[in-house]
Image (cartoon, rainbow, N blue to C red):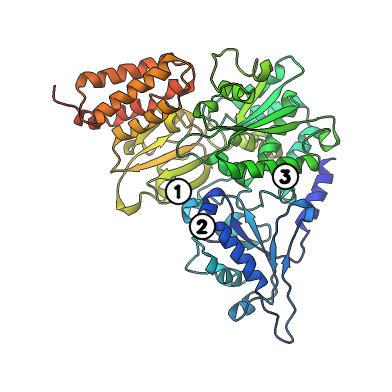
Amino acid sequence: MNLDDLADKAEEYRNQDPDITHEARVCMAASCQSSGAPEVMAALHRALTAIPPPAPGERQGDVEGDAERDGDSEGDGTMAGAGLAGPADRVTRGHRCKVKGVGCMGLCSAGPLVAVAEKGAELMASTLYREVRPEDAPAILASVAGPPVARLHCPTDQPFFARQQRIVLENAGVIDPDSFKGYVAVGGYAPLVQALTEMTPAEVLREITLSGLRGRGGGGYPTGLKWSTVAKMPGERKFVICNADEGDPGAFMDRAVLESDPHRVLEGMAIAAYAIGAAKGYVYVRAEYPLAVERLTTAIRKAKRAGFLGGKIAETPFSFEVEIRLGAGAFVCGEETALMASIEGNRGQPRPRPPYPAESGLWGCPTLINNVETFANIAPIVRHGGAWFAGIGTEKSKGTKVFALAGTIENTGLIEVPMGTRLRDIITAIGGGIPGGRAFKAVQTGGPSGGCIPAEHLDIPVDYDGLKTLGTIMGSGGMIVMDETADMVDVARYFMEFCMSESCGKCVPCRAGTQQLHALLDKIAKGEARHQDLALLEELCEVVQATSLCGLGQTAPNPVLSTLRFFRDEYEAKLCAP
């Protein structure tokens, strides 16, 4: 198979329903499902089947329930133009609309979300409806060729959508995550075929290096350098691992990507495997993400059946198999050596490095580990070239970054912005600011491994180097926003309790140190501590940071140190008199 063959297939899939002019897309990601999206989807299907026959002399319209074309079991419904009774009978005439489930549209706080768009249109070109209820289904279908339903309308030109640049999330909210044909129709698997048929592994490595992509899992290590290191290692067995063990409080980026566009992640893994010479891959995902696991399982099965996973991919000598490994929810298994131990069937505990996984990883073989977002960036880089990606972002932080906005902020949800975007723009413009007229106090970035940024630093560009100067990290992309009512000692205590509970116990500094740090924070919060306790807290933070075995312990003191740096007065106000 070459690119022309795949392009013909994509064109065939796009034209499969030539009479369909519009789509009613229902967000079926976990957040919208929890707020009633399945009921909305069912109501839209019922509204389709309730369309009465046309009046005498009018063009006959039909209602279809698509089933099992290409084995996708999508169950799409289509609405014909002669449509609904009353006004809907007029506004829908001549238009046929298909109802389908799609991935995350981003504005999770406004779910369930439904977008009505011309067939194949981007999310920004759709008419978006928020907080949709089942009883709204007839009105939404009636609006297909008419004015929007004003009481539900959610403008897509608002800053939340307009200020984003979607690369990783370009298909989210547009395609059906369970549809292989839907992914191919938007150009899916073309970069993989391009790499296999028109590029050598060295040329793929060169493009990834040129792109300046850095690992999106938290460390920010240059992706091209990591791939090149594994590629140079001798040995017949090499592995690719996708780290989908997302455990930070308030983080849901990887979950949303897997739920919305699982084929994109698999394609990135396959390109990586070709570049480094691997034939086997694993996706390590926590079992608490059942919807992501279900959609990923479906995607693997369909990709393998279509010849894009398994043996002789795209009729080339390259073969690549992918398996899913479920994690039990241990936060420490996000650390790469603990993750590999878990895949091997051992207790998920970290080991000293070196040797690094690139040299001796899974079962002692060279192993490449990247997270979900990193792999989701690979196909666009191959498609457009490394220089294109390097033109986005800042000098040392290229491309875009997906963030999960949570906490006391108006627009909670998933966003993707260019690296270097000001923190103020993310929180006030895209996030909509603090609800209830309260003042902004701090934002926690990087989860339990990060720190708290106060209001006076809101103009900092969000990139790897900028955040580091404030004693925090980007992490995998969680942002928890806090208003003026937040008690920063309680915030530090919460994150320390999390790290204490999640410590694997292998090394004493983390096992005992986090317990002692939590005890000191608890003592301060209760007003029972003295100045010497505060000094001991700072000293112990430095010891745990410097002597812990893995990243969990090494970064556990960060929330304490950052709140001490910017909100020290809150600690001192709780101390007893000397």
Type of amino acid at the residue the image marks with label 1: Thr
Q: Position of residue 119 (x, y in %)?
A: 68, 60
Q: Which residue is mark 1?
A: 412
Type of amino acid at the residue the image marks with label 2: Asp
Task: Assign the C terminus to one quadrant of the image.
Answer: top left
Residue appearing at x 69%, y 17% in the figure: 365
Q: Which residue is mark 3?
A: 188
Pointer 2 or 1: first along the chain = 2
Q: Position of residue 302 (x, y in %)?
A: 75, 44
Mark pair 2, 3: CA separation: 27 Å
Q: Which residue is mark 2?
A: 157
Kindly indicate whether the residue at mark 3 contacts the one at mark 1 (C-beta within 8 angstroms): no
Residue appearing at x 69%, y 37% in the figure: 266
Residue appearing at x 56%, y 24% in the figure: 221
Secondary structure beneath dot 1 equals loop
Within 10 Å of disc 3 (Cα), the crowding (few <14, some 14-19, many 20+) is: many
User: From this viewpoint, which residue is outermost toward the bottom?
Assistant: 56
